[in-house]
Amino acid sequence: IHSEKNLPAAESSCLPLPYDSSLPSSLLQSAPRVCGCCGALRPRYKRLVDNIFPEDPEDGLVKANMEKLTFYALSAPEKLDRIGAYLSERLSRDVARHRYGYVCIAMEALDQLLMACHCQSINLFVESFLKMVRKLLEADKPNLQILGTNSFVKFANIEEDTASYHRSYDFFVSRFSEMCHSSYEDPDIRTKIRMAGINGLQGVVRKTVNDDLQSNIWDPQHMDKIVPSLLFNLQSGEGTESRSPSPLQASEKEKESPAELTERCFRELLGRAAYGNIKNAVTPVLMHLDNHSLWEGKTFAVRCFKIIMYSIQSQHSHLVIQQLLGHLDANSKNSATVRAGIVEVLLEAAAIASSGSVGPTVLEVFNTLLRQLRLSVDYELTGSYDASGNIGIKIIKTHEERQLQEAVIRTIGSFANTLPTYQRSEVMLFIMGKIPVPGVHPALTNAGSGGCEGTRMIQIMLLKSLVQVTTGFQTTNMLTALPNSFLEPLLSFSLMEDPEVRLLVLTILLSVIDRHDNTPKFSSISIISDISVLKLKVDKCSRQDNLFMKKHAQQLYRHIYLACKEQSSGPQHFETLYTLLALISMELANEEVVVDLIRLALALQELAQTNEESLSVYNRCAVHALSAAYLNLICQLTTVPTFCQHIHEVIEMRQKEVPFLLPEDVFIENPKLPASLEKLEGDVLFQQSKITEVLGGSGYNTDRLATPYIPQFTGNTHLSTCSRILTVQQYRSVCVSSVDSVGMEEQERERRRQVVEKFQKAPFEEIAAHCGARNTFPMFSLSALPRPPPSPSGTISSGYGQTQSRSVPVYEMKFPDLCVY
């Protein structure tokens, strides 16, 4: 029948007579009888394999015979490779003859044998299995591709007992990646093929990621195929936002979508990435977003990196941040929308990452962002991406550059929020060192940086960055939070003519000084009859705070005073100055500071009264209102009834006669001001003599209270810089103040010299007689002694519901002669 008469019986018995559909049915029925005499000569494993196939493939696998085959494979594992080879031979023949029912039966048998057998001989069986899977994947029938993929996924979930030295999965990576990009006409079949490809890639990763003997799946040649394939399918589900580290809340329908399956696969891939593999996994993501212009939309790019940041191990977060920063640098001359997209991704990544997200190179992160900020300013001013001034190919849009700048500033703040206090202080100093000062940075006056306008823009952008860094800043030691190297240059910018720069400087000071979140309670200037409603949070002034004020108080007072003299100051400036005065009173105040702040408020009243600076009517009224609002606050903090009474009497008189000197009538949208402001007299002014009298009765230093406040230089190394940016009137005032200060210092030095000379040359009896007097040489003989225990002579309130004891000044106390000697 088969024209095989000359073959040996054993070989002829191997011919698939019962499976040849081309034979007549009568011959098929008689075939077993024809070969029956040769059946016993065929190998047992072949007979067992043949028996699992039914006559009708629709009947499916013969389970009883499959159990016999499985038992045989377990009993004789050395035959497993031959079983696999024979099944592979049958499957190849069935595929070629389009007998797909038998193909499914063969694959089912292979799957069951794989699940049951874990012996040392399984490697050769696996080779036959992979050969059959490859045969199915190479077929042009979608059902066969899906069948082969499903079998491979089952195989990938099996943990093999023995290692394989020669197995390769390169074909499967390429083929599954190709299936992920399927463009089959039927959408349902296309979706199934793509999902099969995703499952296949997931299987390859599971099978190879922890096997050191396999080719490294993290190599760029593999990652460049796997990651873009996953992102291609993830993009189809861009409308579904990644809500949590794992999509556990997704519905069953969503779980069946390619996008959700891709996200799970992508998360698993990233979760298995070790330290050295992060770069190879993230680089294809960056390239995919570049090649498909996906940075500009931001949404998909942000979603991708949210998945990455949530999936990788937290200690590796800084590696992703560094790659994004490097990619930002590489795109420095790309469009503003692309750079803004990268920056937005950085912003989201920093918010997700842990406190170690910046990694070991903290300043390098901020240096990169500041460099991008400066480049954006240059691009906006020059209109070109070419520093040489040549006309750029791309048109630079100002509003896009502004959006980029704001995004960079927000990102700087986001990174700063992840840092501990000491590192944030370093970043503050670092940014301060980048702010250009006219006359000190001559390179900024060239045409490439836009001259003075370029300098101003960079100053504003960097100060805005400092605002972001200092927001939420908490410190217990003001000396370390505001060191000389930071405070002095910061205050030097408070004297600039640009009102926006001055306002940013004040905002930065508020953020650093406010340690109890009291700033929102002073968002507007008003006369508060009872400050207890504010529920202020105040702690006792610490020793470090006292040292800080002893060192820097005069600097702060001077700059507050000079800020009130600026013609360009608006309502926001005065409101911020009021808040600054209030915060100093609550955060850094001791007896001496309280006295100086009252003197400062009275000096501001005198400034508006004399009008030597030729201020506008609005500015004079605003300074009067600022002084009144602050004195109303400080009198309630000191809890001296007579002091409060005087302040309230003046305020009531103003409400009746000159309401435009109170904040409620000044700091409104349309203030009703007089055409001119004549010199005021009488009960509408706060009287320094009266305040000195009432506070002196409570133990305050009357000599200091009676001395009018004059702003003084405090050895600021930036004075030469400040003088370059002051107005003529400011410069004249500063010079006059400086001369007055020098004169006072000379008088004090001469007085001290006379005291020292007297104690060196006078007889002992004369010195002893003078020591008995209360007020003899108080500054020399008693100022160095320790303060005595608190006395009940008076108290000062630190805030609502809190008071602290006051002590009688040392120079007002009597000491025994022996103590003085």
Image (cartoon, rainbow, N blue to C red):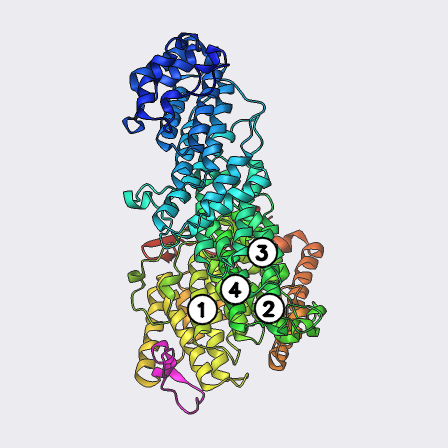
Kindly identify which residue carries mark 3. Answer: 328
Q: Distance between the residues labelled 1 and 4?
A: 35 Å
Q: Distance between the residues labelled 4 and 2?
A: 15 Å
Kindly identify which residue carries mark 2. Answer: 377
Q: Is residue 79 magenta?
A: no
Numbered disc in front, either 1 or 3: 3
- What residue range appears in magenta? 659-684
Quadrant where the N terminus sits is top left
Q: Residue 479 versus residue 242: which sits nearer the camera?
A: 242
Please state the horizontal and vertical placement of residue 272, each as a whole percent of the image. Answer: 48, 34
Please state the horizontal and vertical placement of residue 95, each as a whole percent of the image. Answer: 43, 32
Looking at the image, is mark 1 or mark 3 earlier in the sequence? 3
Query: Which numbered dot is residue 337?
Result: 4
Please state the horizontal and vertical placement of residue 222, each as a whole percent of the image. Answer: 56, 39
Please state the horizontal and vertical placement of residue 344, each as a whole percent of the image. Answer: 48, 57
Looking at the image, is mark 2 or mark 1 earlier in the sequence? 2
Q: Which residue is drawn at 31% across and 28% down?
A: 57
Asked whether the beta carbons under mark 2 and mark 1 sit within 8 Å of each other, the answer is: no
Numbered disc in front, either 2 or 1: 2
Numbered disc in front, either 1 or 4: 4
Looking at the image, is mark 4 or mark 2 earlier in the sequence? 4
Q: Distance between the residues labelled 2 and 3?
A: 16 Å
